[in-house]
Image: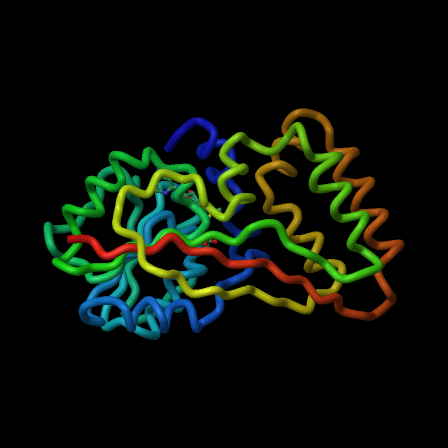
Amino acid sequence: MTLAADQHFQHGGSGYAAFRPTYPSALARQLAALAPNQQRALDVGCGTGQLSVLLADEFEAVEAVDVSADQLKHAEARANLRYQQSPAESLPFADNSMSLITVGQAAHWFDLPRFYAEAQRVAQPGAVIALVSYSVLSIADPLSAAFRAFYAGALADFWPPERRHVERGYADLPFPFDELQAPSLRIERHWDCQTFLGYVETWSAVKAARRQGSSAVVEDFARQARALWPTGQRLNIVWPVTCRLARLS
Ligand SMILES: C[S@@+](CC[C@H](N)C(=O)[O-])C[C@H]1O[C@@H](n2cnc3c(N)ncnc32)[C@H](O)[C@@H]1O
């Protein structure tokens, strides 16, 4: 794990499991339909299994790896899903053994040339690789403006440089393959204030702000959010999902 990734993911697996949104099940269905068969999929940088569990509905067997023991400790179990601790750059699988390789919101942390070499090694002929990410959320009024000011203003100095890839939907992440047209999807949730603030706590920038003694910026926003949030209501939150997709030869 890079030092930056280590700081962000060594702890906090329980927060991830509780608050990180999962992907639309249509994403796993569409990826499975593109794969040459539905026998074995691999989810790399799986976190607590946000994408892995959806793949488990579509494939006979799913392997999921993450470099963080703490994330894996809180991962969601399925009978046909096996989690292992491993870096993306050195995968514990045989050559030609996977028909789909996914990465959910993690590729910007990887040493990509080394990961891509491993992906090509473990891919069956015609296997599909998918780098999935979801970028900055939009939240309904009356939170919209306060949220934008917090995300791009108060937290500006605390986002790691890797974050820019997520904000651009991985558009400028090196992807040296013949690209396929990717599905256009979004994640949508109706959350109460407490769940929303729990999710905010999983952000790398919030963890960095707290580590660097700037918890006040987070507390200020939490106070503002509680004051603005309509009592007893849930607000609509949307994340656009983007995907870089290719077939490996
Ligand atoms: C933002 S989380 C994403 C988790 C999950 N895939 C999702 O879609 O929500 C990024 C994950 O990448 C993992 N990670 C970072 N660098 C890694 C590496 N080099 N190899 C494997 N996993 C890595 C972290 O431990 C973390 O669990």
Question: Relative to 54, is 90 above or below?
Answer: above
- Is any atom of residue 127 visible in this view? yes
Residue 60 percent across, percent down from the top left: 23, 72
Question: Relative to 188, is 104 above or below?
Answer: above
Q: How is the image coloured?
A: rainbow
Question: Relative to 228, is 78 above or below?
Answer: below
Seen at 64% across and 30% down, the residue is 158
Q: Is residue 148 left or right of residue 27?
A: right
Residue 62 percent across, percent down from the top left: 27, 63
Residue 56 percent across, percent down from the top left: 33, 69
Residue 61 percent across, percent down from the top left: 24, 68
Seen at 15% across and 53% down, the residue is 249
Seen at 34% across and 74% down, the residue is 57
Q: Is residue 137 left or right of residue 46?
A: right
Seen at 68% across and 69% down, the residue is 190
- Is any atom of residue 73 visible in this view? no
Quadrant where ligand 1 appears: top left
Quadrant containing the N terminus in the rendered view: top left
Q: Quadrant of residue 3?
A: top left
The number of numbered discs placed on residues in the rendered structure image is 0
Q: Is residue 172 left or right of residue 155?
A: left
Name the one closer to the observer, 160 or 247.
Answer: 247
Name the one closer to the observer, 71 or 218.
Answer: 218
Name the one closer to the observer, 205 or 100.
Answer: 100
